[in-house]
Structures are given as C-alpha cells and as structure tokens.
Amino acid sequence: MDFGVTSEAMNQAFRFDVETCREPIHLNWVDLLAYLGTKYGGDFGKYKAEHMNALAQQLKDGATIEELTKDMKYYSYYRNAYGAVLDGMVGEFQAEIPASEAPAAYLPQA
C-alpha cells in the first residue's frame, strides 16, 4: 500500500485530534484520515478540507466512527494501514530535558 496522505490532510486531522484530546468527544486523527482514505480510494488528490470539517462535525454531533463506517467495506483496511504508520505519534507525552533547553512557555512561572 502507498501512503499518499497529503500534509494538509494530516495537519488538519492532527489539529482536530489535539484540540479535542480532553473533550468529551475526542477526534482521533487516524480515524479521520482512514475514513477519508476509504472515501477517496486512497487518492488524497481528492482531498478537500471541507470533507474533513463535515466528518468532524458529524462526530462532534454524536455520530460514532463505527456508525459512519459500518457500510464502508475497506475502512478497516485503511484504518489498519494508516494506524501502522501513525498510531502512537500523537498523544500526551512526558519528556525530561534540562531547563536550559526547554521552551520558555514550558518553564514554571517565577
């Protein structure tokens, strides 16, 4: 399988994931990309930001990815393939670095 997801699509999906990570409805970026990948037959040349916006809105309105993909024969294929590349790349992480290397925004306020 070719992984031809555009940087624009990945960035938009990433932003949805990060912005909803602590919300009651979390939008998983891999699920978003796999849904669109299935719709496009893997051809992200068809990608439009409004497609992802519409999907995100459906999910925010209470639809589940399982409901939306129940009749999508190849969704699990794209979810597994994209997940093999992207799962684990976004989430909450903790790293220890010297304070001298930390961005100012991450340092305790004095």
Image (tube, rainbow, N blue to C red):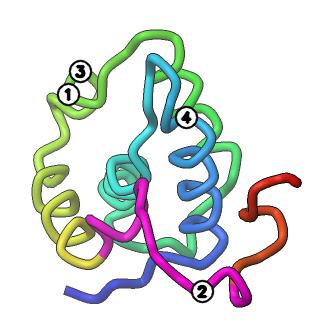
Which amino acid does the dot numbered 2 rest on? Pro
Which residue is denoted by mark 2 in the rendering?
98
**Drawn side of residue 80 relative to residue 108, left or right:** left
Indicate which label's residue lies in the foreground, 4 or 2.
2
Which residue is denoted by mark 4 in the rendering?
20
Is the residue marked by circle 2 packed among few (<14), some (14-19), or many (20+) residues within 10 Å? few
Question: Mark 1 near mark 3, Cβ–Cβ under 8 Å?
Answer: yes
Is the residue marked by circle 4 packed among few (<14), some (14-19), or many (20+) residues within 10 Å? some
Indicate which label's residue lies in the foreground, 3 or 4.
4
**Looking at the image, is 62 positioned above or below residue 31?**
above
Which amino acid does the dot numbered 4 rest on? Thr
Residue at 26% in and 78% down: 85
Say what secondary structure mark 1 lies in: helix
Which amino acid does the dot numbered 3 rest on? Glu
For the record, the magenta segment spans 86-101
Q: Which of pointers 4 and 1 lies earlier in the amino acid sequence?
A: 4
**Looking at the image, is 100 positioned above or below residue 14?**
below
**Drawn side of residue 50 relative to residue 34, left or right:** right
Residue at 42% in and 10% down: 62
Where is residue 99? Give x, y as percent.
68, 80
Indicate which label's residue lies in the foreground, 1 or 2.
2
User: Does the segment drawn in magenta span residue 97?
Assistant: yes
What label does residue 66 carry, if any?
1
Is the residue marked by circle 3 packed among few (<14), some (14-19), or many (20+) residues within 10 Å? few
The answer for how far apart the CA atoms under marks 2 and 3 are is: 46 Å
Which amino acid does the dot numbered 1 rest on? Glu
In the image shown, does 32 or 103 lie closer to the viewer? 103
Where is residue 31? Give x, y as percent.
33, 48
